[in-house]
Amino acid sequence: QTGTAEVREELEADLVLTATGRKAVTDGLGLDALGIEIRPNGDLAVSTSLMTSAKGVYAAGDVIGAPQLASTGIEQAESVIDAMLGRRDVGAAEDASRLLDMPVAAADCSPAALLSNAARYPIGIWTMPELAFVGLTAAAARAPPHNLDVVEGVGRYSESIRGHVHTVGSEREGEYLAPFMRGPGSAAAGAAGEQLTGPALKLVVERAAPHRIVGVHAFGEDACELIHFGTTLVQGGKDLSDITAVCFAAVTYHELFKLAARDAIGTLQCDAWRRIYTRLLQMGDGDASLSSDEVQRGLERMGADAETVDDILQSLFSKKNRGAVDIEQFVKRASRMRSPMQLDLMAAGDANASTDADAEVYNRLN
């Protein structure tokens, strides 16, 4: 049942796994006699220091409610000991609270604090294959209270060296050599309708520079191990350059982080070229395509130097194809050259992309 609509579907399966969550078993412990507040679902009510309503009595782990993980239970137990001894490490919790601009009291390991900030801890699901995540999904990042403009980058296991070795002899052998697509504007776009398949690692990244990483999601072998580097990235407020600068040991799945980062950069490149195209089109003769002369004049007006103009013209217009280019041809050809992220031209495109006139042209093209 979803919302108000009920959908019934018959499915034949060999095995059914029902995951209904955990419930604290606090009956019969005599907690009422101590004056400890017990919520209707059996959870013990605690303060930010994990003290119950009975002074001097603390609780941690599954009995105080979600997230009810071994990892967070251990952290809660350590927090309780620190509170009892008057020793509280404020640094880690304060740093984590700043990541997604959400207030969290120092060393607050209460259920409310842990659940309010997706960057506080990773989650690993020990299925086959494994699942793991930390931080925000793209949908959560775009929604209140975050309201972030984000893009995604995906690294497929089969694209990595180790993944390629492990797919030999399987149905996914050679998958990394095939063209594929991840959606409109992706630098990796290939044959229409061919979708991303197989285990993968995904980064959720802010579109605006320096492209901070706000979420990491993994599906595949060793995902529950890989997620700890992802946690370091999210909690440390790291950006794409922090990943691309790392030389990962071969042959390991950590290469997936670099593959995903490059994919995100490819999407950002395509977006940048689309903005540049929109700006050039405004400067042109009014057609829905651009000639070589229009591109050259527009780039010069945008402040591009002669070498940059020549590089772009060579990418867009070959001896065999000197005709005008539409937006898809422009983006596809331009994306093959050096990244506009390395050009002053990208800044010029960004500076002019938010005008009403640009928005009107861009919407008309798309």
Image (cartoon, rainbow, N blue to C red):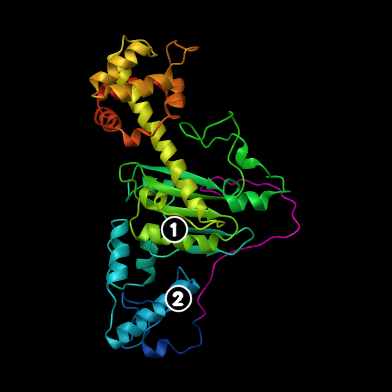
Q: Which residue is mark 2?
A: 73
* Viewer-nearest of discs 1 and 2: 1
The part of the image, by quadrant, that contains residue 117 is: bottom left
**Residue at left offset 39%, top offset 64%:** 115
Vertical order, 195 against 45 (above or below): above
Disc 2 crowd, CA 10 A, few/some/many (<14, 14-19, 20+): many
Reply above or below: 194 against 53: above
Category of crowding for the residue at label 1, using alpha-carbon neighbours closer than 10 angstroms: few (below 14), some (14–19), many (at least 20): many
Pick whichever, 364 or 332, lies toward us: 332
Relative placement, left or right, of 95 versus 288 is: left
Precedes in sequence: disc 1 or disc 2: 2
Marks 2 and 1: in contact by CB < 8 Å? no
Q: Which residue does the image show at 48% across and 88% down from the upper left?
A: 29
- Across and down, in percent, residue 120 comes to 38, 64
In the foreground, 37 or 144: 144
- Quarter of the rendering occupied by the C terminus: top left
Can the viewer see residue 318 in this picture? yes
In the displayed structure, 364 sits above or below 106; it is: above
Where residue 16 appears, as percent x and y from the top left, is 69, 60
State which quadrant residue 20 falls in: bottom right
Q: Position of residue 11 (x, y in %)?
A: 72, 50
Could you say where residue 35 lies in the image, as x and y percent from the top left?
A: 36, 86
- Label 1, label 2: how many angstroms apart (C-alpha)? 21 Å
Asked if residue 7 is among those painted magenta in the image, a careful observer would answer: yes
Q: Residue furthest front?
A: 307
Instruction: Identify residue for label 1.
Output: 230
| Circle number at residue 348 | none
Q: Amino acid at mark 2?
A: Gly
Q: Amino acid at mark 1?
A: Gly
Residues shaded magenta: 1-25
